[in-house]
Image (cartoon, grey):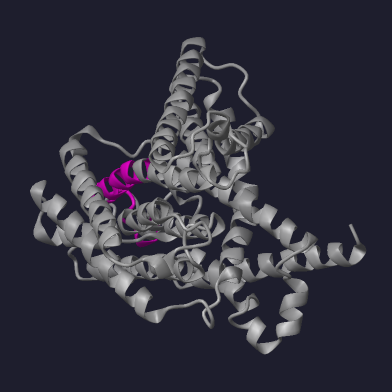
């Protein structure tokens, strides 16, 4: 590698990391999701701001092709994998049997109705202008439907932690529903990515070796592959958990082995034609379960390994990932205000009405149902990951990417403002056990604002 390219790579990483941390800290100081600040940091360095003020400098530091672009794309992809791994880890210990009926009704109504609405609306309307280079209408339909139905666990958990309501029954219901939604919707997203990948892999992967070519056969294959991968890894995790519990502990996979598992699962997903982020997400789920295996001496060691991964991931890879998301945003040439406003309004209304209906069917008070509807509209990190996946795989156009990212940002900010307002008005209670300033640093807060 030429010294000039190495200099550009190091300079680009330094600028992205500093911009992400500085703007993220600024947003955190004002009790806003840091992920919004990290994206803003990248936006300032991208074509929207720096590209308008100093276009030659912006193109020199952040070229679209060559070694620098390849290196930044690698760090970006690793950041997404580690983010999804941490999202999976955070999904442990949020369920309670006494909330079963409420969680079930809100999850079914609040996810199925928006997803079905997205499927119907996208099928009826002309979406030819929204298609990406892949030109696959089915995949785009699935992505847009998921973007309407999705909820961000990390963002809403951090908001509730900052507001001092993280231990309330309200928070437990929100997180439990979000866990179920994210698991199901990640399967759907993986299927959408697989459908597109199956037609562009040039002979690579199991689907190609099996001779699967038609659209219907591809959809069936990738659905089975996604569910089968989840079932296989879950079975391995269950057996490992039982073995740890029965033996009372034992050697625990060190940090290097856990990171290797994330990379290996992502590589396996690529071969199967499944979204690589899905593999990292599933490994995170299993890691969270095995780390929490009761009665084992290995539990603390496993928690330490996950804590170490979280530390370097959230210190470098994840902030750079979100900064690169901002870097890819071009609000001058790749932003359709009419589509964004329409999509934002429809997504928020459909999701809010569905969650509200589910909460009322579960006999929750009207005020509580409204708070649930707003809280579960926060799309945050998962919404941004969905947008980047749609862009990187060619499912959606750059304008779709921009609109999905901005929708995730706006809904996250709206959820924080609404819940704080509800607390100040006395319609939402804070934690009874500890004041906000003394809340412990739980796993759910670790990827703050993501």
On screen, 28 above or below 253?
A: below
Residue drawn at 55 percent across, 42 percent down: 276
* Depth order, front residue of 385/410: 385
Residue 210 location (% of width, % of height): 53, 28
The verdict on residue 314 being magenta is: no
* Depth order, front residue of 104/267: 267
Which range is magenta? 161-183
Left or right, residue 110 beside residue 433: left
Left or right, residue 198 beside residue 69: left
Q: Main secondary structure of the magenta part?
A: helix
Residue 363 location (% of width, % of height): 8, 48
Q: Splitting the image into 4 quarters, where does residue 93 fall?
A: top left
Residue drawn at 59 percent across, 53 percent down: 314
On screen, 311 above or below 424?
A: above
* Depth order, front residue of 393/239: 393
Pick the quarter of the image with the N terminus.
bottom right
Residue drawn at 45 percent across, 73 percent down: 30
């Amino acid at each position: 590698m030429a010294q000039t390219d190495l200099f550009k790579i190091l300079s680009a990483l330094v600028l992205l990391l500093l911009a992400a941390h500085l703007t993220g800290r600024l947003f955190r100081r004002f009790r806003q999701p840091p992920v919004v600040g990290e994206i803003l940091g990248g936006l300032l360095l991208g074509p929207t701001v720096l590209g308008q003020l100093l276009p030659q400098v912006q193109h020199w530091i952040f070229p679209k092709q060559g070694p620098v672009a390849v290196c930044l794309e690698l760090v970006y992809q690793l950041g997404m994998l580690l983010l999804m791994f941490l999202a999976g880890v955070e999904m442990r210990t949020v369920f309670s049997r006494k909330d079963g009926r409420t969680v079930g009704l809100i999850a079914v109504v609040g996810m199925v109705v928006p997803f079905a609405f997205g499927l119907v609306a996208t099928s009826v309307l002309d979406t030819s202008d929204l298609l990406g280079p892949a030109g696959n209408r089915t995949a785009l339909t699935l992505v847009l439907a998921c973007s309407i139905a999705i909820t961000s666990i990390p963002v809403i958990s951090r908001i509730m932690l900052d507001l001092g309501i993280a231990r309330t029954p309200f928070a437990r219901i929100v997180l439990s529903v979000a866990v179920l939604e994210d698991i199901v919707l990640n399967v759907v997203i993986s299927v959408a990515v697989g459908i597109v990948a199956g037609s562009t892999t040039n002979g690579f992967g199991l689907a190609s070796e099996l001779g699967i070519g038609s659209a219907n056969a591809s959809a069936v294959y990738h659905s089975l592959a996604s569910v089968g991968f989840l079932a296989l890894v879950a079975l391995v995790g269950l057996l490992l958990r039982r073995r740890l519990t029965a033996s009372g502990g034992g050697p625990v996979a060190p940090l290097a082995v856990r990171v290797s598992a994330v990379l290996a699962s992502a590589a396996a997903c690529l071969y199967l034609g499944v979204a690589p982020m899905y593999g990292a997400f599933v490994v995170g789920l299993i890691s969270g379960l095995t780390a929490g295996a009761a009665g084992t001496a290995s539990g603390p060691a496993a928690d330490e390994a996950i804590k170490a991964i979280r530390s370097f991931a959230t210190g470098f890879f994840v902030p750079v990932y979100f900064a690169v998301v901002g870097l890819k945003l071009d609000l001058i040439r790749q932003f359709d205000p009419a589509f964004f406003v329409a999509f934002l309004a429809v997504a928020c209304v459909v999701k809010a009405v569905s969650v509200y209906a589910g909460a009322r069917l579960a006999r929750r008070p009207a005020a509580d149902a409204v708070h649930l509807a707003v809280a579960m509209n926060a799309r945050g990190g998962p919404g941004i990951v969905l947008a980047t996946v749609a862009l990187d795989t060619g499912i959606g156009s750059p304008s779709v990417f921009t609109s999905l990212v901005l929708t995730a940002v706006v809904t996250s900010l709206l959820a924080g403002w609404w819940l704080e307002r509800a607390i100040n008005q006395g319609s939402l209670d804070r934690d009874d056990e500890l004041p906000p300033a003394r809340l412990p640093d739980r796993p759910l807060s670790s990827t703050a604002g993501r």
